Amino acid sequence: MRRRSKIVIASSVGVTLVVAAAGFAGAAARQDPASGRTGTMVNACTNPVLERDLWGWGPQNNGAPAARVPVKAHVVAEYAYFQSKANGADPQMYLPQKRVTPGDSWTFAMDTWVKGPATGVSARMQVDWFDEAGKNLGHDDGADVPVPSSAEEKWTRVAGDFTAPENAATANVTARLEAPAGMAWTSTACDYRPADLAPDPGASGAEPSSPPSSSADPSSPVEPPEADPSADPSTEPDESAEPVAPAASGDTAAAKFNWGAPAWTDDFTGNAPSKDWGLYDAPGHQHGNRKPENCQVSGGTLKLVSEPNRDTCGMAHKRTQTHGRWEARVKSTGSGWMSLFIIWPDPGDWPANGEYDWREHEAGGKCYTGYIHYPGHTPKRQEKLPDNCAAGGTAQWHNIAYEWTATRMAGFVDGKLWYEFDCKATEDLCRMPAGHLTIQNDDQGSGPGNSAVTEVDWVRGWDV
């Protein structure tokens, strides 16, 4: 029977992660060679072993759509981040950010496993440095580390030493695999520590003396997880299970219908939401414990993080307008939580001034829907939006847009019309005096015990 203990790892976002660890007792324990497990005893990194979700990890620059998968032969981790054989040449991934002080030297590392047609591939750690205002200060590459391709689970530590430059406040940590297209790439145990603090002895990620085993026969290798083959790094997926390609970033309503230059835009390139947003701070709210620290920016995207304890994010753009157009590139993962884009009335006189929930659905669900609430109607009157089951569902990137004018209201998915209301035919549906954009993850009864993330690549707004 597998013996378990707990490691408590301090998180940089105020959440304590309790990591289920196998085969050792305590943080200072060393690898048991007889277990056949490889990998590094992680030190301190937000979500290092992906215990609950993929928060902080993601694909970039030829990285394939990702999944969180179980693993069996790592000395600490039971889950890993997986990019499939759809990877392009030289794919990259981003890892959780790290707050830094100028002049400090850090080792940024992770354990990685590759499988595929190529041999002689290598990986390296990389860092983009940002100041407090979100300005990019430069990019550094670590040394290339050879990574053997293996059909069985085998972990190699990839590490690089970096020194934070003047004015640095945040390190955006990434990794690059130097390999041809078609490699499956799996990583876990991100490990951030001062450069002079070595990894725990005996946990270097070297090849085990015997294959990992889950049977009485020590020569029998562990079989790959018997999960959905599209999310299994050691199983060739059926072609029908390949991830659906996300919509191109250019498939927008703005481009198709010539909306012109936006009045404002946010590409979330810093390390926190900009001053243009107000972050909700309402721990006892009916839709979840609204906490600013759950509204996070990393790796070029905004993340609204909702946790099983009902901690969640809500945020409102400070620009108020009467009529307008809005578009965002967004995806959501998880379950139980509702992911919403809303035009909320100014002043916040509800229900007298209405509420336009122009994108509302369960995080990770198959279809978009929403509810447009009429101003001034008691009892409440609303228009339910038709389901729009976009390719790949809401867990894939899609471009969602909304138009509100004096004469019509319309929605769009990837540049295609989703719904349309004639404001004259629907009486006073469109007569909200003024409003502003809000983005929220809401507990509407199914949030406790579930986690979800709404991720936003960019959002733009236009005057009408």
Image: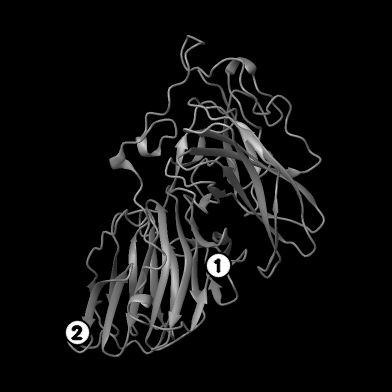
Residue in the foreground of this view, choosing between 266 and 152: 152
Instruction: Inspect this view and state whether residue 234 appears.
Output: yes
Q: Identify the residue at horizontal 33%, vertical 83% (top origin).
A: 404
Q: Identify the residue at horizontal 70%, vertical 67% (top origin).
A: 132
> Does residue 68 sit above or below 290 in this rendering?
above
> Does residue 324 sit above or below 130 in this rendering?
below
- In the displayed structure, does residue 37 sit left or right of residue 141? left
> Does residue 248 sit above or below 364 in this rendering?
below
Instruction: Inspect this view and state whether residue 286 appears.
Output: no
Q: Quadrant of residue 29?
A: top right
Residue 281: give x, y in percent of width and height.
Answer: 55, 68
Report which residue position mark 1 lands on: 268
Q: Amino acid at mark 2?
A: Thr
Residue 219: give x, y in percent of width and height.
Answer: 50, 11
Residue in the foreground of this view, choosing between 156 and 95: 156
Q: Identify the residue at horizontal 24%, vertical 70% (top origin).
A: 385
**Of helix, strand and loop, which one carries label 1?**
loop
Around disc 1, counting alpha carbons within 10 Å, would you say few (fewer than 14), some (14 to 19), or many (20 or more)?
many
Looking at the image, the residue that sits furthest to the top is 217
Q: Amino acid at mark 1?
A: Phe
Residue 163: give x, y in percent of width and height.
Answer: 78, 52
Quadrant where the C terminus sits is bottom left
Residue in the foreground of this view, choosing between 204 and 240: 240
Report which residue position mark 2 lands on: 426
Residue 352: give x, y in percent of width and height.
Answer: 33, 84
